[in-house]
Image (spheres, rainbow, N blue to C red):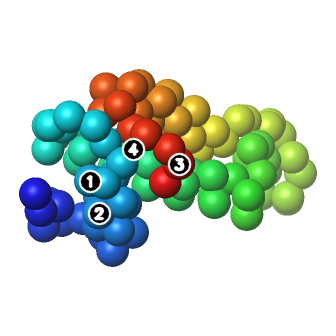
Amino acid sequence: MKPPEYFTDEQRSLWEKLLVKVTGNPLATDLEAYCVEFSRWREAEEWLKANGTEILIRDDKGTVKNVITSPQLRIARDAMSAVQKLSKVLRIKGEL
């Protein structure tokens, strides 16, 4: 089973690792979703590590007017939830 053409190198590598870790006959769409969500989670976590979990909203003078939670926090949380669900569907054995 080959990975989708649009996959990044990281997603292709994960696909290859998954093929030996899943049990049974996984659906290609489940493998695809896992790889996409896993890479989305990693990208969001890297962004959060570099930029933090809060975004400061400043006025023209640079004064902080508001602080909001970074959207990447929700992206990371949602992607990890999807990865955990797909791990059960794929019955991944061991660590990647």
Q: Mark 2 and mark 1: span between their CA atoms? A: 5 Å
Q: Can you see residue 21?
A: yes
Q: Say what secondary structure mark 3 lies in.
A: loop
Q: Say what secondary structure mark 2 lies in.
A: helix
- The circle drawn on residue 37 is 4
Q: Say what secondary structure mark 1 lies in.
A: helix
Is the C-beta separation of discs 2 and 1 under 8 Å?
yes
Q: Is residue 60 above or below residue 56?
A: below
Q: Mark 4 and mark 1: span between their CA atoms? A: 16 Å
Mark 4 or mark 2, earlier in chain: 2
Which residue carries the number 2 mark? Answer: 16
Q: Is residue 84 left or right of residue 73?
A: left
Mark 4 or mark 3, earlier in chain: 4
Residue 59: x %, y % from top left? 78, 51
Amino acid type, mark 1: Leu
- The circle drawn on residue 95 is 3
Residue 22: x %, y % from top left? 31, 42
| The image quarter in which residue 23 lies | top left
* Closer to viewer: mark 4 or mark 1: 1
Amino acid type, mark 3: Glu
